[in-house]
Image (tube, helix red, strand yellow):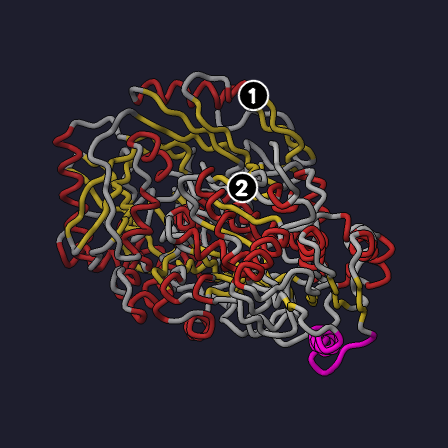
Amino acid sequence: MYADSLLDAIGNTPLVRLRIPAAEHAEVYAKLEAQNLFAIKDRMAKHALQEARRRGELRPGAPIVESSSGTMALGVALVGTLLGHPVHIVTDPRIDPVTLAKLNALGCVVHIVKEMDDRGWQGARLTRLAEVMDANPGAYWVRQYENPENPASYAPLAGELAADLDRIDILVGAVGSGGSLCGTSRALRELMPDLYTVGVDAVGSVIFDQPDTPGRRQSGLGNSLHPPNVDRSTIDEVHWLNDHEAFAATRELAGEQKLFYGNTSGSVYKVLRGLAARARPGTRIVGIFADRGDRYIETVYSDHYWDECKLKAEPVARRPRQVEPATPVSGWSYAVLNERRRSRTFVFIESNTTGSGILALRRARSLGFEPVLVTSDPGRYRGLETAAPRIVDCDTNDLSALRETLNAEFDRGAIAGVSTTSEFYLDAAASLSAELGLPGDAPGAVATCRDKAALREALRKAGVRQPDYEVITDPGQVDAAFTRLGPPCVVKPVNDSGSTDVLRCETVEEARRQAARILARTTNGRGQSAARKVLVEELLDHPEYSLEMFGADGVHSLVTAVEKTCGEPPHFVERRHILPAPLPEPVVADMAAMVRRALVAAGVSHGATHTEVKLTPDGPAIIEINPRLAGGMIPELIRLATGVDLIECQLKSAAGAEYTLPDRMDGCAGIEFLLPSGRGVVQEIRGLDEARSVPGVVEVRITAERGTPVGPAVDAYGRVGWLMARGDTCDEVAAALSAARDAVEIVLGADGRGQAGPR
């Protein structure tokens, strides 16, 4: 592109799309301001000096003075000398040799202060600058930190962005003097009022009310003073990085994107990646990349410098920690400055360990919430990093501790919803939601469903058909219950999950042993106190289904019926789900009516419910009610068959937002769980590619890594993976699942070997 002069060559820098992991259809761009003749501050120097000449503040040939150790010095040197002015730059010993060489080559007089004063390096430089002004009558001081022409000079940058992109959702830039980010944001918002602006600062910079750390090693951003040109009304969120994080990200920018740029650009790059990972689908993000890397040869890009400064001793955060404004930080952290734009959080009290738990965290982010996982052990969640929630540590088995943690971590109004995908924490989530005034079921209703003995009593009083039963608190009570209800009968705990310890007992001896085993347990798998009660139930040996319902103000809509297949007795491990269940509509309607009666009896009125039903010759009978979304990936099957994400509906419901339930099925979907046939250690799982190639199969997932000890599955936690399929009919889905299952071989070592999965 032709230019009459170097001044005309300033601006019109490239806008490049970056290839980094991001939400679905999200776009991340870099505005390469380092491609100016020297760097981004060329824009400010050109505009400010030309305006000063136009107004008569800068007379022809008068000296120009500025305090800078980086790109502003180079911009003033370039434009000032081109316009015929002597240029004086006041700097400090942190100036890099490359910049110093350039300034000398351009013909500037460089004044280097010797040491900091009580206001840091900036204070010492300003003292020296006053001396230079006194020695040069008529000199013009550019005043980048307070000159209003600084932010005004970035209106052309905003115009270039608007010409290239008709919409920008998030703008990210480093903050030093405040001119480039505040000026660009202000101008862009005239065209894009909903623009969200994110500033990037250094740990130890006072700009956004952090304590001053004069020894910080980053340059080009941060400050020891409060620059008047930092207009906080234009910045919605600020991130801080320590020196290690900023320098490492700068090297990553070069290695990953092939941009050999400076640490302000590296810092912006790290924040861009973090924002992209938690952005809503379709979000468009632009980062301003201000400076080149040649200034940082002896610092950012020097291993010797890293070792000398012990940079690697500083921690590097994988994700930022949210803090309140003015909270002192030592590593990657962020604060929302604009209360109107403060993002609302969705709090999950623990999660289930596979399947829909991680999906729910991801969906919360896609809906615009910040997902927060309150947990005592994040390490139990495989794949958690893909959801990138904020982690809050807490003893989640202590309701008082949970309450105190939420009060300490969040403003009450910032919490949009509280929920869980774990059976074990439904009570806690319901109690906290009620205390916060959020939508949800009454804690008493949830407690009734969680205690299967209490549920049996509520259903009995309401006359709802269910298995006959006895509640046992001592093994000595088993004989009479077994004699009345069996043989065979079902013995199970009243408040566990995933068919754990649910056993079909053919003899009274088996029933006694199972009851004694359950009663001897003091805690469950999550360390919560066991109920020390046992249900002995009549065995309803009939087809099993689940009805997925969704409630609003006590009105429960049927989403779908699911056909369920269990493995071989004596355990009740669910092996296959297919939906919609291949049943006549009147039968499904009868089942739904029974479930509605049961939900009313239990007091459940809100959100998703998963109710297990046996279809007996006398009609449907309720096995249990779960006041939550179904597990076993059933919500994902519903999405495959309807296009509607029930997880999103549940999250919206819990946050009091509008949602739309599916009104028809466009096909059928099913899941087959892979079960080991013996006891041993997983050596290999063969045939996965063959399973994936089966027509109709849409997902093959293995959850047991090589070396994992496994045994014959006795509950849902013994599964080692799943196969998922979609088709036009249930028969097509069943055939696809069977063919894929037969292709898979689970090879075991130690105790067993060879056998295909669930045949």
In front: label 1 or label 2: 2
Query: Is 278 one of the magenta-colored residues?
Result: no
User: Is residue 379 something one can see in this rendering?
Assistant: no
Q: Disc 2 residue type?
A: Tyr
> Is residue 587 visible from the viewing direction of this image?
yes
- Secondary element at image label 1: helix
Badge 1 local density, few (<14 within 10 Å), some, or many (20+)? few
Callouts 1 and 2 close, C-beta under 8 Å:
no
Please tell me which residue lies in front, 234 or 414.
234
Tell me which label, 1 or 2, sits earlier in the chain: 2
The quadrant in which the N terminus is found is top right
Decide if residue 311 is on the left or right side of residue 574: right
Q: Is residue 362 above or below residue 95?
A: above
Identity of the residue drawn at 56% across and 74% down: 209
Q: Residue at x 71, y 48 (%)?
A: 292
Q: At which x and y percent is residue 754?
A: 62, 25
Q: Position of residue 514 (x, y in %)?
A: 44, 52
Asked whether residue 130 is drawn in magenta, I would say yes
Depth check, front residue: 515 or 456: 456
Q: Quote the CA–CA distance across marks 1 and 2.
A: 37 Å
**What residue span does the magenta drawing correspond to?**
114-135
Give the labeled residue for mark 2: 29
Q: Residues within 10 Å of mark 2 (few under 14, many from 20)?
A: many
